[in-house]
């Protein structure tokens, strides 16, 4: 048996603006997806017969990436992430599956996290009909604090370039890492509204808004400027300034119509105990995130307001093989 883990992600700044060439900043979180694979006499996924058409991410990795032709496999998945909540659950699944399968077929090879990020991105693109940003898969694979943008960002460490042929033409991204000081006393608390986040609908809604009201592009540009300020604060470990940038980003996201009453309810409930609080991901539902020094109190506020909390240390690790104990 081989086992691998890949974390989920949280976007600190840059939602929606990244679609228009602005940078996005994401951090890995401690919760994620674990995949276990073992050889079997039949194809099984979580105790049921494996149907490839129902699991495009897994099928793509098996057939298109690895071209697997070995014995049937029994695949088990354990997820600590809310589904359709903007936490990168499908990217974490793709990365964990890719890592576990590589360990199975090439146990003597070290896990290359950049190659894994590319594998995950190809699975996401296949499942999303050719449209997928590398943000989720890169952050899940590499861990820490990741910047995805159209061009390299000064003050960050460039890791790799990613390209994708989409129905709208070729797209290219630069993936970089933000080196941040060790942070002991600050946590991220995610609050799930219980409402799924319709990513495609929200992205399309912003596109229509900008077409009907081109002046709203100023909000997108402002998010880009806020992201740059937030990056500077992260690099210096000034978490108070990071929180202020998160609040400012939320103001702009409200102005382009991607927040929701459920998100605003959780944001309002937690802002008194947070350095910064905002939606994370596409909006319209899904999760908000609080940057805080009092995670238990924030989690309680989320529960009282009707949400489901998830606490994580700031900037956890990336994907990894889980070594079997003898």
Image: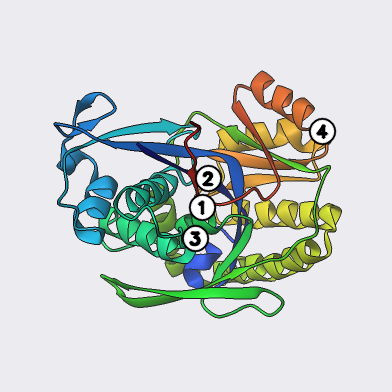
| Quadrant of the image occupied by residue 292 | top right
Nearest-to-viewer mark from 3 and 4? 3
Determine the secondary structure under disc 3.
helix
Determine the secondary structure under disc 1.
helix
Q: Earlier in the sequence, mark 3 or mark 4?
A: 3
Q: Mark 2 points at which residue?
A: 7
Q: Name the residue under label 3.
A: 138
Residue 138 in the image, given as x and y percentages of width and height: 49, 60
Question: Circles 1 and 4: CB distance less than 8 Å?
Answer: no
Seen in the picture, residue 207 relative to 21 is either above or below; the reply is above
Residue 310 in the image, given as x and y percentages of width and height: 62, 32
Residue 326 in the image, given as x and y percentages of width and height: 48, 31
Question: Circles 2 and 1: CB distance less than 8 Å?
Answer: yes
Seen in the picture, residue 147 relative to 4 is either above or below; the reply is below
Q: Earlier in the sequence, mark 1 or mark 4?
A: 1
Residue 312 in the image, given as x and y percentages of width and height: 66, 38
Q: Name the residue under label 1.
A: 140
Report how far apart the C-alphas of labels 4 and 2 lie in the structure.
Answer: 23 Å
Q: Mark 4 points at which residue?
A: 294
Q: In which quarter of the image is the N terminus?
A: top left
Report how far apart the C-alphas of labels 1 and 4 lie in the structure.
Answer: 25 Å
């Amino acid at each position: 048996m081989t086992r691998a883990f890949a974390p989920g992600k949280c976007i600190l700044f840059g939602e929606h603006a990244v679609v228009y060439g602005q940078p996005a900043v994401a951090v890995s979180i401690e919760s994620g997806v674990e995949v276990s694979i073992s050889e079997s006499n039949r194809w099984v996924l979580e105790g049921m017969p494996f149907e490839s058409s129902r699991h495009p991410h897994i099928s793509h990795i098996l057939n298109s990436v690895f071209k697997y032709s070995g014995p049937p496999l029994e695949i088990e998945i354990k997820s600590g992430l809310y589904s359709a909540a903007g936490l990168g659950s499908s990217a974490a699944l793709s990365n964990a599956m890719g890592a576990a399968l590589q360990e199975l077929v090439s146990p003597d090879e070290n896990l290359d996290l950049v190659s894994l990020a590319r594998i995950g991105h190809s699975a996401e693109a296949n499942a999303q009909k050719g449209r997928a940003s590398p943000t989720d898969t890169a952050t899940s694979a590499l861990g820490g604090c990741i910047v995805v943008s159209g061009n390299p960002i000064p003050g960050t460490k460039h890791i790799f370039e990613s390209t994708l042929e989409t129905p709208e033409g070729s797209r290219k991204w630069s993936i970089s890492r933000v080196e941040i000081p060790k942070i002991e006393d600050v946590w991220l608390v995610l609050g799930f509204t219980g409402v799924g986040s319709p990513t495609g609908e929200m992205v399309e809604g912003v596109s229509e808004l900008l077409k009907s009201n081109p002046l709203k592009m100023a909000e997108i540009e402002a998010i880009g400027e806020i992201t740059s300020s937030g990056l500077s604060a992260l690099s210096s470990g000034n978490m108070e300034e990071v929180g202020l940038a998160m609040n400012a980003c939320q103001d702009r996201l409200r102005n382009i119509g991607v927040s929701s009453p459920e998100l605003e309810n959780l944001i309002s409930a937690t802002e008194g105990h947070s350095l910064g609080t905002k939606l994370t991901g596409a909006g319209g539902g899904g999760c908000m995130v609080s940057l805080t020094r009092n995670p238990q109190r924030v989690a309680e506020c989320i529960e009282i307001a009707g949400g489901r909390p998830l606490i994580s240390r700031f900037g956890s690790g990336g994907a990894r093989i889980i070594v079997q104990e003898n």
